[in-house]
Image (cartoon, rainbow, N blue to C red):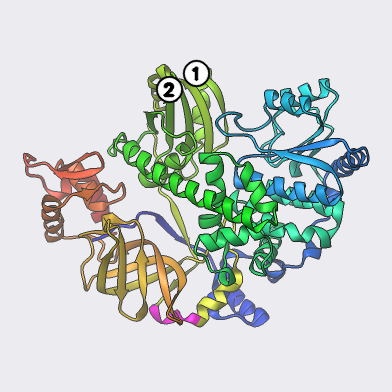
Amino acid sequence: MLDNQYFWFKRQTDKQFIQKIEQHFSLDRLTSTVLAGRFSSVPLIEDFFSSDLNKLVDPSRLDQIELLKKRLISAIDNQEKITIYGDYDADGITSTSILLKTLQILGARVDYFIPNRFRDGYGPNKFVYQQLIDTGTKLIFAVDNGISGFDAVDLANRNQVDVLIADHHQLPKKLPNAKAIIHPDLSDDYPFKNLSAAGIAFKVSKYLLGTQKARQFLPLVAIGEIADVMPLINENRILIQTGIDLIKSGENKGLQEVIKRADLKLESLTAQDIAFKIAPRLNSLGRMADSGIGVELLTTDDSDKVSEITKQVEHLNKQRQKEADKIYRIASRQVSPQENNIIIVSGENWHEGIIGIIAGRLSAYFGRPAVVFSVKNGIAKGSARSTGDFDLYKVLDRARDLYISFGGHKQAAGLSLKASDLDRLDKILNADDYHFSVGRLAIDAVIKAGDLSIDSFKQLSKLAPFGEGNPEPIFDLDDVELVNLRILGSDKKHFKLKVNGFSGDILFFNRPDLIGKLQLGERLSIVGTLSLNEWKHRQSLQIIGKDIRSENRIPDRNSFSRIYHYYCAKNVLYSPNDFFQKVFLELGFVRIVNGVVFVVPEAKHAELSQSYTYRKRAENGY
């Protein structure tokens, strides 16, 4: 018997509206159902499908953009040295590249600086500003940072150096005294507030060069917007879709080589490919080394340089993956799975560029917020990630007096403090009893196996690009019989299922908790997304599973006995949402050590009804 890991809820749809969409857009029933659950009118769907660059909001509606243009033109006319001050993540690299190429086209005397995560930190650094000024910079253009750089901007002003800012991060209470600030939230006349730095840089480029010349930068906009998890709606959808189309047509040598080395098919490149393959490679530069070469990669036409830099990118990305896996294994052993508190783990000299990834993984796996610290020379530098809609920033703010530095938002934060204060931090953060909500999956349609075909997949693909704000359609393949099962991978973490009525494969990745839980002939409901598998010029439909549950919802004593004996014979990994493990833990039949389930031989006899989890399931009938 399997329990779903997430809470499933069905998007509301109206049959008449579905039919109206079918007729108006000549779409099939399944795709029309997805749209009906996400939009309330035909005009909104028409806007969704539009990819016309002329429908983008005019950049002149961004407050202070004319002031910014005048200062840049003055610097160009007088050949003043301009330095673009970027950021070390993918959005920072791409936005810096866009502005660098734009100003070069205009004949500017321009250079760029990408701060080193470990040496310089995030955002305006007074010491770096002073170095730039000392080496001849007369105008600093901060992009993807700067909005909180009051002190650094003040230093520049005292040295008669102007600062321009193009940023999208949360506005501080006090703005820096910059020559011009371009920020959607400061522009009442600009209706779309969800541009990343790359999107804002494109707006500046378009204002300076015009649409035709600025259009070449849309591939970089697509990378930056997706990497920074901007919602794929409104302007972003147009920018990203056009950017992906231009990448497919061969724009940008650096990107082409990254795509090639990532083993991606250029002609079928998707937003998901960018999110999970390209963006992590660019981000690995800032996590493991120095992001400056990322700008060179995206702006050079020298094939030899491109080849050399992409080799470095691949090496650093593999290094990042290896380091992240190593630290995660160590960190996860520090977590007590039976507790329901905020996870706080630390290690000596853990790689500071990796701890954010580790916090995200721990939070996702255990369903609790996680704070991960790297301790060096008595100072603990931390990265925090939340879960669900839990406001982690608010809780972390309780211990503000302990911090050397602290910043972030509801879902993520960065902080540092003395390592000797970590125990105090734990007590402050976990003074309350928390009830963290289970993750939610929005179901676009409940379907039968016969509803699916390659044609329906191609129709659904018209809704791409998928990502934040426009997720891949999720379907509930309801009440199907399991007819075949294979465990995949050397680490036995992946599964391939076959069910009655559906000819394709159903794949589950990183679900070792499924071992021993699935029985042939069992009736299941499977939630997942559709994918097209291409092998030897043949195409077949497959489902990428997101969650699964048994339809025979209340297991009998024999099922518990079978699972118990399986635990006796095998080392099974702990899974926070596993129904059997919850029951056995409550009855004292098992304990968790370093993330592994161990049977307690001396456990006393107990009835299933003594378990709260089992009683609740039996009472509710599911």
Mark 2 surroundings: few (<14), some (14-19) or many (≥20) residues within 10 A: many
Dot 2 or dot 1, earlier in sequence: 1
Q: Position of residue 408 (x, y in %)?
A: 57, 34
Q: What residue did someone put label 1 on?
A: 402
- On the image, the x and y values in percent for residue 470 come to 58, 60
Q: Where's residue 489, x and y in %?
A: 30, 61
Mark 2 and mark 1: Cα distance apart in space: 8 Å
Which of the 4 image quarters holds residue 220? bottom right
Q: Secondary structure at mark 2?
A: helix
Q: Nearer the viewer, residue 49 or 302?
A: 302
Identified at 37% across, 31% down, the residue is 345
Q: Position of residue 287 (x, y in %)?
A: 52, 40
Residue nearer the viewer, 475 or 77: 77
- Mark 2 = which residue? 425
User: From this viewpoint, is residue 14 visible?
Assistant: no
Contact flag, marks 2 and 1 (Cβ < 8 Å)? yes
- Mark 1: which amino acid? Leu
Task: Report the residue at 91% width, 43% height from top.
Answer: 73
Give the residues drawn in magenta, as a range.
Answer: 449-454
Q: Is residue 450 magenta?
A: yes
Which residue occupies 59% across, 72% down? 267
